[in-house]
Amino acid sequence: MSTDRKYMPLKESRGWYFVEYHPPASDFKFANLHLVITIENARDIDIADAMEKELKNWLNRYPIPLFFSAFDNKGDLIHSLNTIKGSDHLIGFFDQDGKIRLYWRLVKDNEIPDVALNKEYVNKLYSNLDYKTYAELDAERRKRRKEIKTGSFIIFVWLVIIPLLITVLEFYSNWLALITLIYSFYKAIQTGLELRGKWPKSKRKKAKELEERLKDHYYYHCQMNPEGFKRLMLENLEKMGKDEIAKEAELLKTN
């Protein structure tokens, strides 16, 4: 049986930020740690201090080399730490003497201890975490692909095979031909009354027409002011990112 596992990440709240710990993927020498800010205008020095503190904390809990990055409350990587630390990323691990070494720089691969490559050690270290084997993940992917193929086949049958069968049956069945003729008359009368505005519109059609009018209205104004539209789009994306991070932070606090 394969010992390769994909462990679920750990998330913990710290008030003005939360951390997200990702155990190392198969054949990787290091785990990943993310610090996500939940407030506006956090100071770079405070972020850097928190990163160094968190890295030591997580190394003591799980002595696997760590690659640490920080993100703002919109989910964007923070690029200003290099002005005070010389790098935006922090790397840390235990050296041969059992001391924690922190580096605000990229570290060469041969400098990083290879303890994470020992699968037996890693599985024992993370035995308290939820995980799935790569075989299970592969089985899930195959199942999703099968479901997609099945759905595509059903759509094909509904849109192609059934109309074809109806056409064939129509040719051989007088009753079906009569039903088709009546239905055709009904649709023709309906279309004629709709064109004259005398056929009552369904709520769904009214809502769709309103949506189309609003789309045309918005499109017109977007064409009139493309720069304004671009600013609005960026503001919306930022707001979506902030809202998602705020919800996640609140959930972590509650838990």
Image (spheres, rainbow, N blue to C red):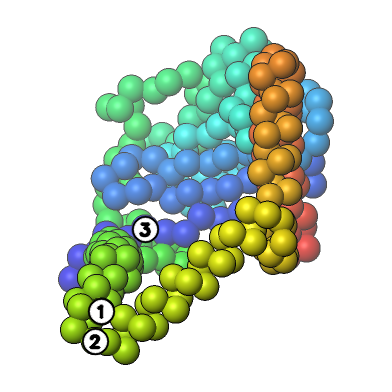
Instruction: Give the CA separation, mark 1 to mark 3.
Output: 56 Å
> Which amino acid type is marked by label 3?
Lys
- Between label 1 and label 3, give the one nearer the viewer: 1
Q: Which mark is residue 6?
A: 3
Apparent side of residue 170 relative to residue 223 in the rendered image (left or right): left
What whole-number distance in Å separates the C-alpha atoms at marks 2 and 3? 59 Å
Give coordinates of residue 218: x percent, y percent: 72, 31
The answer to whether 104 appears left or right of 2 in the picture is right
Quadrant of res 49: top right
Counting other residues with Cα less than 10 Å from the Cα at mark 3, is it few (<14), some (14-19), or many (20 or more)?
some
Q: Would you name the residue on which mark 2 appears? A: 173
Which of the 4 image quarters holds residue 164? Answer: bottom left
Characterize the local packing of mark 1: few (<14), some (14-19) or many (20 or more) Cα atoms within 10 angstroms: some
Image location (x, y in percent) of residue 197:
71, 56
Q: Is disc 1 in contact with disc 2, using a CB cutoff of under 8 Å? A: yes
Please give the name of the residue rendered at 36% of the width and 83% of the height, measured from the top-left corner. Answer: 178
Residue located at (55% from left, 17% from top) = 87
Q: Secondary structure at mark 3?
A: strand
Picture layout, residue 109 above or below residue 60: above
Query: On the image, numbered disc 1 is attached to which residue?
Result: 170
Residue 236: image quadrant is: top right
